[in-house]
Image: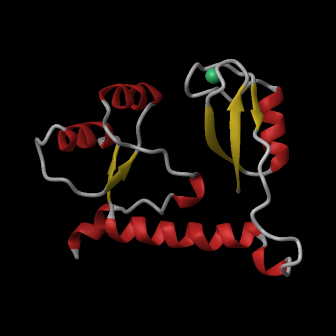
Amino acid sequence: MIRYALICDDCEAEFDAWFGSSSIFETQREKGLIACPACEGHHVRKQVMAPSVRPSEKAGASDPEKVFGKLAAKARQHISENYDYVGDGFAEEARSMYYGEREHKPIWGETTQEERDALKEEGVPAEPLPPAFVPPKKSDKSKLN
Ligand SMILES: [Zn+2]
């Protein structure tokens, strides 16, 4: 997984997105599948980033894929231990918490694009999880503990 800092040529919005590899990014970009979250335009390109690691440092130790893999594993574990999976009910749960109708708790689940847009419009805090951060879904048997 690679995270790219992207910029929209139409409205100059800057945003981050995750891709399986640089070639997947290029393919999606060429097909116009990457949309700017601000204006939904497709003229999106990579931002030029300054290197954060000095070239003299040993290369192998900071292999970004490995570092990301560890990070993702940690995030997955953290989410599966501390967050309740609410499935399709995510938008509703997040909204009820936002409006104080129920107690705040960490949750994760699934939304449709429409639900996501609606949450965003209402100012309900919710962030998409990068695919590598998504823990295995808990089945109902976890409730029997
Ligand atoms: Zn834009």
Question: Which residue is at the front of the view, 123 or 29?
Answer: 123
Q: Quadrant of residue 115?
A: top left
Question: Which residue is at the front of the view, 25 or 59?
Answer: 59
Quadrant where the image shows the C terminus? bottom left
Q: Position of residue 139 (x, y in %)?
A: 35, 62
Which residue does the image show at 22% across and 72% down from the upper left? 144
Residue 130 placement, left or right of 57: left
Quadrant where the image shows the N terminus? bottom right
Look at the picture and state if 85 lies above or below 6: below
Q: Quadrant of residue 13?
A: top right
Which residue does the image show at 58% across and 66% down from the upper left? 72
Q: Position of residue 24 (x, y in %)?
A: 80, 43
Look at the picture and state if 81 lies above or below 61: above
Which residue does the image show at 69% across and 44% down from the upper left? 5
Question: Which residue is at the front of the view, 141 or 25?
Answer: 25
Which residue does the image show at 62% across and 74% down from the upper left? 70
**Which quarter holds ligand 1?**
top right
